[in-house]
Amino acid sequence: MPRLAERSRRVPLTRDDIVDAAIRVIDDGGPRPSMDAIAREAGIAKPRLYRLVADKADLYNEIANRMTQDAAKTAAPDFTLMMQPPRTAVRRLVAAYASTIREHPNVFRFLTQAQFGADSRESGLPLDVARDLAAKLTLRARPMLAGLAVDANGLDYLVRAVAGVFVSTADLWLGSDGTPDEDRTTEFVDQATEFVWQLIDGFLRRKNIVADPATSILTTIAAAGAGAVKK
C-alpha cells in the first residue's frame, strides 16, 4: 500500500515527524535534500509538508535544534556536568557532539553548508549552525556565571567563539569528503577541548575568577560564593 495512504490512517504528523524524515533523507542521500524527497519520505504530499514547516530555512532550524538536543542528552544532564572539573565537562560536551556527527555526518554537512536562495520559497539569509549551538551554550552558561557571581557581559561573544571553534574544527576533522576520520577522532576531541577550555578560562580570568581545571564546577561555584577564589 502506498506510504501516503498508510499515513492518512495514522495519527496526524508533527514537526518532529518531518525532522525525522528529513534526517533519514539527508543520511541516505547527502546534504542537499529536496523538499519533494522529504515529503515522500514522510508519506505526505508537498503542500501538506509546507503546512508543517514554512520552508527549508524553518526545517534547517528544527534539524539544528534536534542535533544540539541529542548531543546535550548524550553528554549528561546539566547537574552531572557541573559535578565534573571544567575541562572534563568541556571534553564530554565535545565528545558528545563528535558522536552525534559520526552518526549523522551528512546532517552536519547540511547544517554547515546550507544556502537558501532569496528568490525561492526556501528564502532567507544563509544560516550558521554555530548560531544555534551558541544559543544552547548560553542557556547552560548563564546559571553557572550567576553561581559564580560573575556579570555576563561578553558572554554572547564567548559562546559564539566557542561554537565557531567547534564547528570549524569539526569541519577539519570531517575532511573534504565529509566523512569522519576515525583515526583522528580522539585528536579532534582533544584539540577542540583544549581550544574551547582556553577561551572559557581566559573569559573567567578577565572576570577575576580562576577555575581550577581539576576541581569540579560545583566546588568552584561554592568557593566563589564564599569569596575564596577572587583575586
Image (cartoon, rainbow, N blue to C red):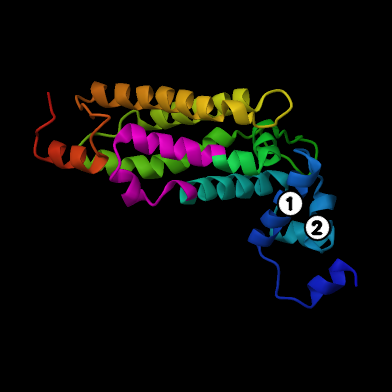
User: Can you give x and y, in whole percent of width and height, for residue 81 in the image?
Assistant: 34, 45
Q: Is residue 164 visible?
A: no
Q: Name the residue under label 2.
A: 41
Mark seen at residue 24: 1
The residue that appears at 78% across and 38% down in the rendered structure is 32
- In the picture, measured across the screen, residue 192 lies left or right of residue 37, that is left
The residue that appears at 41% across and 49% down in the rendered structure is 76
Which of the two labelled residues, at mark 2 and mark 1, occupies the earlier sequence position? 1
- Whether residue 203 is in magenta: the answer is no
Does dot 1 land on a helix, a strand or a loop? helix
Q: How many labels does the image show?
A: 2
Label 2 close to label 1 by CB (< 8 Å)? yes
Which span is picked out in magenta?
74-98
Q: Based on the displayed image, in which of its 4 quarters is residue 198 positioned?
A: top left
The residue that appears at 77% across and 34% down in the rendered structure is 117
Locate the C terminus and report the quarter of the image it occupies. top left
Q: Which of 75 and 25 is in front in this view?
A: 75
